[in-house]
Amino acid sequence: MYNINKSIMTDETERALHALKLPGMANCWTSLSETHQLDKLSLRDGMQLMMQAERDKRETNHIARLIKNAGFRSKCTLEELEVDTTRGISAAAAAEIGTCEFIDRGMTIIITGAAGTGKSYFAQAIGERACRLNHRTMYFTMGKLAEALKLARLEGREVNFFKKLANQDLLIIDDIGMSKILGDLQNDFEQIIDDRYHDKALILCSQLPVSDYYNLFQSELIAEACLDRIVHKSLRFQLEGDSLRKKY
């Protein structure tokens, strides 16, 4: 009868903790019960274990939300990145980027290279690490960004959209140069670049060298304004080698 009552009490406690939105504590309580540790721990020690479990659970959930909200196309991590000086990414450089200090300094990273050399993977891997270090991050291809901007204008929420982009600790724009930057998109792109200049981190990926960015714009004035902000305080990675499509 004693064991039955204990089991009922354990189940009720677990349900109560879940009802209070304390899943980490609930899981810890169940684990302690299953391993017969409840009667061996003091109230103080048990509470410390359960509170730490709740903190860990909330941190894990928070990171998962950051990664989900970033909008990455695929799961990429710096741990699985192929580092090789002949490919343009040394182990030392990858480790330094992995600290994400460039985000605190509001720097721009420019990743260039031929198709299949791992530009998108590298950028998203940096973004994934940024999320794990509690940095708000968003990822777009240039095409998806153009679509999102167009939709925001049609729905009259462009101000809020620009504010959302500006509030990100790290913004990643991939596939720059796949098409010309024309019309309103030029002004939108300039505003995005200007909002981040000297303040928030930015990663740009393209098959084109930076010197060819100028020709992407319809307006020479906008091209000059954007390039002036992009080239300063930027870290450059020129990726080389055979295609990594099969690996990534």
Image: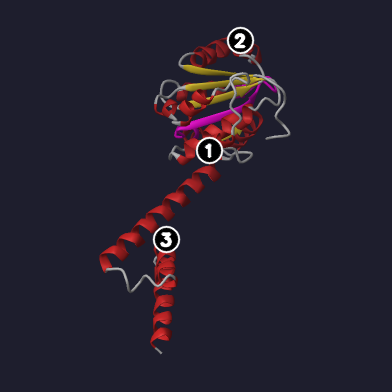
Q: What residue type is labelled 1?
A: Glu
* Cα distance in 3D space between marks 3 and 2: 52 Å
| Kind of residue indicated by mark 3 | Gly
Residue drawn at the location 39% of the way across and 74% of the way down? 13
* Residue appearing at x 40%, y 68% in the figure: 32
Q: Is mark 3 on a helix, strand or loop?
A: helix
Above/below status of 141 relative to 70: above
Q: Is 70 a magenta residue?
A: no
State the image coordinates of residue 194 (x, y, percent, origin top left). 47, 21
Q: Closest to the observer: 126 or 241?
A: 241
Q: Name which residue lies at 60% across and 13% down.
A: 210
Which of the two labelled residues, at mark 3 and mark 2, occupies the earlier sequence position? 3
194 to 74, vertically: above or below:
above
> CA separation, marks 2 and 1?
29 Å
Label whose residue precedes the other's in the sequence (3 or 1): 3
Q: How many other residues sit within 10 Å of disc 1, few (<14), some (14-19) or many (≥20)?
A: many
Q: Mark 2 points at which residue?
A: 211
Image spot of residue 235 (x, y percent)? 50, 18
Span shown in magenta:
165-186
- Front: mark 2 or 1: 1
* Residue linked to disc 1: 128
Which numbered disc flags the more N-terminal residue, 2 or 1? 1
Residue 202 location in percent, x, y? 50, 26
53 or 215: nearer the eye?
Answer: 53
Which disc, if any, is residue 24? 3
Q: In which quarter of the image is residue 125?
A: top right
Q: Would you say 145 lies left or right of 231 here?
A: right
Q: Is-magenta flag for residue 170?
A: yes
The colour scheme used to paint the residues is: secondary structure
Estimate how packed mark 2 is, as few (under 14), some (14 to 19) or many (20 or more) residues with alpha carbons within 10 Å. Answer: few
* Residues under numbered marks 3 and 1 in contact, where contact means CB atoms less than 8 Å apart: no
